[in-house]
Amino acid sequence: MNFSDSNALDADSVSYDAAPVAEIEVDGLEYRVDVGLGSAVAISQREVGASRWVPVAQARWDGVRLRAKTLGHPIVASLERALAQAAANREGSWA
């Protein structure tokens, strides 16, 4: 994933062929988080059952907090929990 412009995020910036870092469903929408460069992540959404993901935000994940200015707090909080769970699962698989 290439984040040359911190404000630009489009479908070509994200590889949907790889498994997401985290994925959740909230109010009929699915959200997925994909890796970026450093602490940057890409967040995409689609309607449940749809096949096409749409990038909606570039965010920062520091291992505890997710910062995504364009998403509402309930979505960000849900994604934070999903990322924390994914990190815990990954750490457990290395033990």
Image: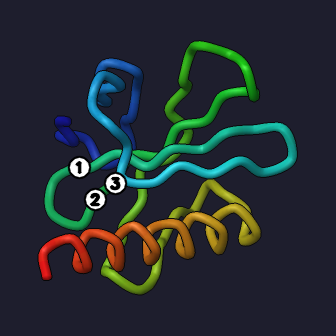
Observer-nearest residue: 80 or 72? 80
Q: Residue at x 26, y 69 (%)?
A: 90
Distance from label 2 to label 3 (Cα)? 4 Å
Q: Determine the image quadrant of residue 73.
A: bottom right
Residue 19, image x, y percentages: 33, 37
Q: Nearer the viewer, residue 39 or 33?
A: 33
Dots 1, 3 in contact, CB < 8 A: yes
Q: Say the numbered circle drawn on residue 40.
A: 2
The structure residue drawn at horizontal position 24% and vertical position 67%, both measured from the top left corner, is 39
- Looking at the picture, which amino acid does disc 1 mark? Gly
Q: Which quarter of the image is occupied by the C terminus?
A: bottom left
Residue 69 lies, in percent from the top left, at: 57, 63
Extreme residue toward the right, this view = 27
* Lateral position of residue 60 relative to residue 70, left or right: left
Give the CA separation, mark 1 to mark 3: 5 Å
The residue singled out by tag 1 in the image is 36
Q: Are marks 2 and 1 in contact (CB under 8 Å)?
A: yes
Give percent across and percent down for residue 18: 27, 31
- Regarding mark 3 in the picture, which secondary structure is present there? strand
Task: Name the secondary structure under disc 1.
Answer: loop
Residue 46: percent from the left, percent from the top? 66, 28
Give the answer, above or below, for where 5 lies relative to 53: below
Amino acid at pointer 3: Val
Looking at the image, is 10 positioned above or below residue 65?
above
| Residue on which disc 3 sits | 41
Disc 2 to disc 1, how far (Cα)? 5 Å
Q: Amino acid at mark 2?
A: Ala
Question: The N terminus is located in which quarter?
Answer: top left
Q: Tell me, yes or no, whether the two marked residues, 2 and 3, touch with CB atoms within 8 Å.
A: yes
The residue depicted at 70 percent of the width and 61 percent of the height is 75
Give the class, few, some or many, for how many residues have Cα within 10 Å of label 2's Cα (few <14, many ≥20). Answer: some
The residue lying at 44 percent from left, 68 percent from top is 83
